[in-house]
Amino acid sequence: MSGELDGAVAFVTGAAGGIGRGVVLALESQGVRTAGLDLAPVEGATLPHVGDVADETTVEGAVRRAEGELGPIDYLVCAAGSTSEHPVAQLPLAEWRRVTDSSLVGTFLATRAVLSGMLARRRGRIVALSSGFARKGYRNGAHYAAAKGGVEALVKSVALEVAESGITANVVAPGPVETPMLDHLVSRSGWRAGVEASIPMGRIGAPADVVGPVLFFLERRAAYITGQVLHVNGGLLMP
């Protein structure tokens, strides 16, 4: 990238998680000042903020603080998310709301909070994290699949609304990635071997495998790409 991102400002949600943290560290290494929002303490960001991405006041306040201390936000990366497993017939409404809030509501709130500034400046990049489950469904994880499907529909709709202003909005949809979110699955006997055998590349992804595509969407060479979903899964899903 030859320093093309240097001097920009980014707002990253889910900034303490595996992929979100990787995005923050990669952006900071490229000279981007990042504001990171997460329920857990954020490491590596110029401006860390602990809070709930599904809380309107928290998100609006974090974005305003970032703009006041770092400057106009050029990039938004929505990496916040959570999951659990329950058959639909036994899925508590509170758990449905927790999972959809962290992914879908959080993406909406963060996008809305940065858009007014981006529209006024007629520039900006928005990248949200989805999942292959949004396309193929998730047995015992309907709430997660629905949330990520909603993220994709939201981002495509935003892309249509802001394209004429020079703003792009895209999605990166990872397959299985070595993050804390995967821990509850990895603990199952034989799960890892079965998943690795189903991935043509023969391995579960690393956060770095996803960070690169996220940063690509922020570069000038991606300026004519918007409303797209890029699947990053070692060939596990080829929609």
Image (cartoon, grey):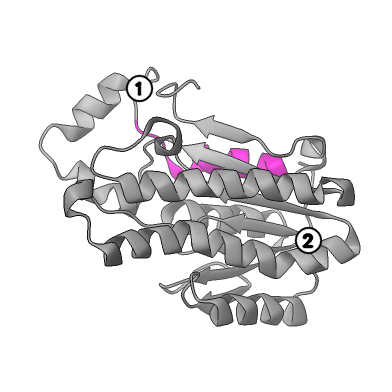
Residue occupying image coordinates x 43% and y 34%: 132
Residue 179 image position (x, y, % from top left): 36, 49
Graded by Cα atoms within 10 Å as few (under 14), some (14 to 19) or many (20 or more), the crowding at tag 2 reads some
Q: Is residue 103 magenta?
A: no
Residue found at the far top of this picture:
200
Question: Between residues 232 and 122, which one lies in front from this camera angle?
Answer: 122
Say left or right for 91 vs 173: left
Residue occupying image coordinates x 57% and y 82%: 57
Identify the mark at residue 48; answer none if there is no mark.
none
Residue 92 image position (x, y, % from top left): 22, 61
Sequence-first disc among 1 and 2: 2
Which residue in the protein does label 1 denote?
A: 199
Q: Nearer the viewer, mark 1 or mark 2?
A: 1
What is the magenta segment's predominant secondary structure?
A: helix
Residue occupying image coordinates x 58% and y 33%: 230
Which residue in the protein does label 2 denote?
A: 8
Say left or right for 63 vs 13: right
Magenta part of the chain = 204-218
Q: Quadrant of residue 193?
A: top left
Residue occupying image coordinates x 51% and y 38%: 173
Residue found at the far front of this picture:
89
Q: Is residue 76 visible?
A: yes
Tell me which amino acid carries mark 2.
Answer: Ala
Give the CA separation, mark 1 to mark 2.
Answer: 36 Å
